[in-house]
Amino acid sequence: MLQPIAIPVLQDNYIWLIRQADNKAVIAVDPGTSAELLQYLAENDLHLTQILITHQHGDHIDGLETLIKHWPQVEVLVPALPFHGEKLAGTACHGGESFSFLNKVRVSVLAVPGHTLNHLAYLLTDASGQNILCCGDTLFSAGCGRIFEGTAAQMYDSLQKINNLPAETVICPTHEYTLSNLNFARVVEPDNQNIIKQMDIVTALRAQNLPSLPVTLAAERSYNPFLRCENSALQQRWQQSSGLNLFSFLRNWKNNF
Ligand SMILES: [Zn+2]
């Protein structure tokens, strides 16, 4: 059984820690800082064996150097082809690679360009078939990342790749943007009751300062407009002739929402 734990850091980031029952070894994803993570590891007597990096933005990597100093044996997976001249220490991945970490946990690397050109997502699958996707700034709950380096078509393909994973896949994005994303979703699809229900759930969680994440892909399909672009009623409503056109329209609109 895999257990994703969200450690809140910076303004609205989460470092995801992937634990496995009866295993003191853990995987961390996108350490934008190190202090909170080191404290959690010490308090729970855990040791860090792998770090997965989805992309090279500072709020996803700035804790890396300190963590490697603390855990010199840690294995790090990073995106290949770093941009802006940055070189990250670790095993460079392009997407398509597969690793075995923890106790028989397969880590499959997916190329999901759009937010950055070399953005990666990591699909973790344990021996029972349980799936967890760590997707960085590609898919958020009820929303998706901004397109900084890629094209709308690349980002759309990346989201479709995620959308094609099994429905029960547990999604772990890096940011707590859910409420503002749901506010946008409600304007896009005012009649969708799933959006209203999810707003009530997330509002209650956030009032207690609890994360709205993780979420399942099945739930996201029911209220995330960026995963619903193939819906013909939604295309008609916004007078868009294809899923990609609707996606581009919604992404541009959200940039200024
Ligand atoms: Zn980013």
Image (cartoon, rainbow, N blue to C red):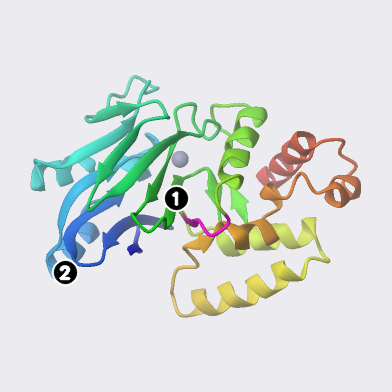
In which of the image's four quarters is ligand 1 placed? top left
Graded by Cα atoms within 10 Å as few (under 14), some (14 to 19) or many (20 or more), the crowding at tag 1 reads: many
Graded by Cα atoms within 10 Å as few (under 14), some (14 to 19) or many (20 or more), the crowding at tag 2 reads: few
What's the residue at 38%, 57% (across, down)? 14
Kind of residue sitting beneath label 1: Leu
Q: How many marks?
A: 2
For residue 133, the mark is 1
170 within the magenta span:
yes
Q: Is residue 10 visible?
A: no
Q: Is residue 42 above or below residue 104?
A: below
Residue 7 horizontal/vertical position (percent)? 32, 62
Which of marks 2 and 1 precedes in the sequence?
A: 2
Relative placement, left or right, of 230 versus 91 is: right
**Is the distance from the Cβ of mark 2 to the nearest ligand 1 atom less than 8 Å?**
no
- Magenta span: predominant SS is loop
Residue assigned mark 2: 44
Q: Nearer the viewer, residue 205 or 130?
A: 130
Residue 225 horizontal/vertical position (percent)? 71, 52
Q: Is residue 217 above or below residue 83?
A: below
93 within the magenta span:
no
Name the secondary structure under disc 1.
strand
Q: Quadrant of the N terminus?
A: bottom left
User: Which region is colored magenta?
Assistant: 167-171
For residue 218, the mark is none
Relative placement, left or right, of 228 versus 179 is: right
Q: Gap in Å between the C-alphas at discs 1 and 2?
A: 24 Å
What's the residue at 68%, 74% (across, down)? 197
Residue 161 horizontal/vertical position (percent)? 58, 39
